[in-house]
Amino acid sequence: MATSATAPESGHAAEPSPPRRLPVFSVRHRTIRAAVWVNDSVNGPFFTVTFSRSYQVDNEWREASSFGCDDLLVLAELIRQCFVWISSEMGKQGQMSRALGRTRQDEESEAG
């Protein structure tokens, strides 16, 4: 006969799980979604982007990270929109040049 082990009671209430992180920006076209996430590092915040495709099996919605040929132009447009949003945010923080590896001198020499 199988027995199950139970954890000893510690007398403490269960600790609440940390709050679920949400993307700082998301954009969707039909079933394709892009989400921008901000992460902190010792060099300051940086952004990552995830992509998903929603589909339905019976009455249950699921997500996949693979895309068909018909999805590619939509995905490219969502990528462009995420790039514009991230660039704007980094510009507000003065980080776009640093992220691209440019210095102020590089920018001034390009300007003329």
Image (spheres, grey):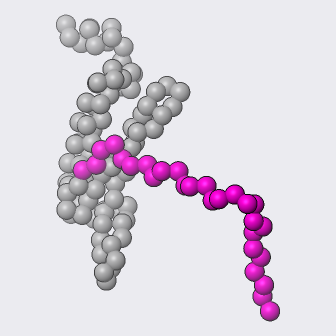
Image location of residue 6, percent across then percent down:
75, 73
Question: Which range of residues does the magenta coloring cover?
Answer: 1-27
Image location of residue 65, percent across then percent down:
37, 61
Instruction: Check the picture and name the quadrant holding the N terminus.
Output: bottom right
Which residue is at a point 43% across and 49% down the rendered structure image? 21
Residue 89 in sight:
yes
Image location of residue 50, percent across then percent down:
37, 51
Q: Is residue 76 above or below residue 40?
A: below
Whether residue 24 appears in magenta in the rendering, the answer is yes
Q: Is residue 29 left or right of residue 15?
A: left
Report the residue that reaches farthest toward the front: 11
Q: Is residue 64 above or below residue 84?
A: below
Whether residue 42 appears in magenta in the rendering, the answer is no
Which residue is at a point 39% across and 21% down the rendered structure image? 98
Residue 49 in sight:
no
Q: Main secondary structure of the magenta part?
A: loop
Instruction: Check the picture and name the quadrant holding the C terminus.
Output: top left
Q: Is residue 19 above or below residue 13?
A: above
Which residue is at a point 45% across and 38% down the rendered structure image? 39
Q: Is residue 38 above or below residue 106?
A: below
